[in-house]
Image (cartoon, rainbow, N blue to C red):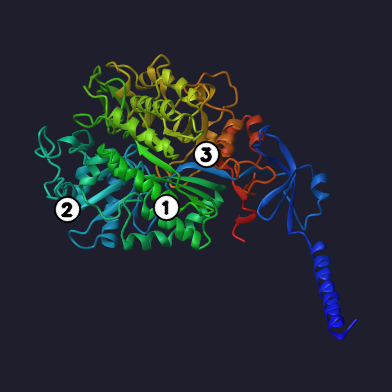
Amino acid sequence: MDSKQMRISALALLLGALLGGCQQENSSAAPPPSTLYLNGKIHTQDGQRSVAEAMVVSDGKFTYVGSKAGAEALKPTQVVDLQGKMVLPGLHDNHIHLIGTVALDMCDLDGQSVDLDALAAKIKECLPRYAPKPGDWLVVNQWSPYDGNSPTATYATLLSALDAMAPDNPVMLAGVDGHAGGYNSQALALAKDKDGNVVGFNPTTLAPGGVFADFIPYVDLSSGVIRDAARSAIPVPDSGVLSASDDQAAAQYDKILPAISELMASRGITGIQDACASDFIRQRLLNMQTRDLLHMRVTAATCFHDDDFSGKLDLPSHLAKARAVRDAFAGNPLIKADAVKIFLDGVIEGDPFTDPVFLPNAGMLENYHRPHLAMDAGSGDVTITADSEDAGSNGIVNYQDADLKRYVGALDKEGFSIHMHSIGDRSTRMALDALEAARASNGDHGIPHTLAHLQVVHPDDQKRLGDLGLYLTFTYAWTNPQLAYDMLVTPFIQPTKAGQPLSEAIYDPLGYLHEALYPVESSRKAGAVLVAGSDAPVDSRDPRPFENMAAGIMRAADGHDEYRASQRISLAEMLAAYTINGARAVRQGEITGSIEVGKSADFIVLDRDLFALVNAGTPEQIAETQVERTVFQGQTVYPTP
């Protein structure tokens, strides 16, 4: 062998030794770190709803779920003793307005029920700080349109209270429901027509044939309350999440992003559908992600709410925007935009104490009734003073039937999930007709479509919800009787008689609403899939998942046939709504929603056993549940490390 060959052989031996060393090192490399969680009551929400005692998490995923012995055999690198605590998959809130869940530095009533004296005092307190100069707007957030606002010796109406406290400033009370606002005379005078001319809301502009004739069902000049479409006529600086847009609003909302992240994690929420996402909201979501604050998966439902409430269907524009947004987030691991929100109607609450009464505007199959109620200013007692009569209106559905079918059919064909706000029974029937037409035309793609709220559904249509296998998003805290609220709804839907006890009229077991109001369990039995949505900040900024669970589950049997007892569901079904069903509703059931090998390690540890509370006959205590730990993608995000 010559010297050249010797050098080549030596080099080959050296290279072989180096490669061999690398291969040996790799073959004995330590496995990735893993964490064993043991001694828990792990409700997996898998297909059998099995309960495990241990699980192993590695690289952000569940790698083992089962017995303690089986988990220990894997020799995990870390061990967490769950001390017998109940464990669930991370919760899914499928109808929430995320950036409205934490208060801004603005005047705020926090959803409290206040009489007109207390409301006036709040306006007086806020003016110097938030609207110090004549002409400055004062926006008051989280006003409750349907609870409180009762007359006092000082103020007979909401309008009079606002006018007295702010004679030189336009005032808007932003309703917690996202549909109603209260305005003073200064603000009402600023309403603009479609050409941008300031003409004001007044008896002339709101008369038949007037420039605002289309808004007549939405405006009550006696109280200053305006709803839905009519609110767009009054240009108000950032009056809430849906209208936020400018740099000042962006700075305000960006300040509260850490608090939003903390709130969601503390409530155990690891997946949401933002139910009306604009460019502004999508940017806030991206900002959260950039700042490592987005500890959840988000489906941002593209929203055209201004068009919805004006009944405008610019189908090419809507589809182009929805596609562009979906494409922009196609590669994002936490945010997607493959859903579109449609507002079908408004609200079903009216005001029976104004003169004339302020009717609801949700789309109903039958005409509303015009009730005659009187409230004693001293005691607050309400009496029925005369028989109700036909009000001559059955409300408004924002789209014509043919337009809605075109819209739904096109979205379904393009592969979008459709999430529809539907309150009245007529709007729900039209939604079902449109979805059935889409399936007949496009076939069944397996796309989960969702109806939200469903306050009144005709019994015939409850079966259709099941036949279509739709996902139904209820806010369960709203489904139980509350007399102060119910008297703003039921007397407009069911006839009332002079002298009839109010409670008897509202909770008539033979009345239409007994079968049609919030049909949770009957729709589930028909085949529909229950999911959960808080609608926060509507009613409450806090998404309060455990309060919703407590309100919606079956109560302990006590022999008393309560008005809504037949529509309550079991705890097992409620947990499915908040976990695996919620994940499937946004097409992420293969990723999350249950504790199974291969899925993202998203789970929560509770301070109490919810099933034990039900078995003990104290399900109301579920409302007080606290989350002790929230883990998202294998990392503890609450409490903050």
Establish if 527 lies above or below 32: above
Asked if residue 220 shows in the view, the reply is yes
Number of numbered markers: 3
Q: Position of residue 356 (x, y in %)?
A: 19, 29
Where residue 547 is drawn, which disc sits there?
A: 3
- Relative to 436, is 21 above or below? below
Looking at the image, residue 370 sits to the left or right of residue 202; the answer is: right
Label 3 crowding class (10 Å Cα cut-off): few <14, some 14-19, many 20+?
Answer: some
Tell me the kind of residue under disc 2: Pro
Where does label 2 land, which residue? 167
**Disc 1 versus disc 2: distance between alpha carbons?**
32 Å
N-term mark: 1 or 2: 1
Residue 99: mark = 1
- Marks 3 and 1, how far apart in space? 21 Å
Is residue 379 visible in this depiction of the protein?
Answer: no
3 vs 2, front mark: 3
Q: Residues within 10 Å of mark 1 (few under 14, many from 20)?
A: many
Q: Residue at x 40, y 24 (%)?
A: 457
Q: Amino acid at mark 1?
A: Ile
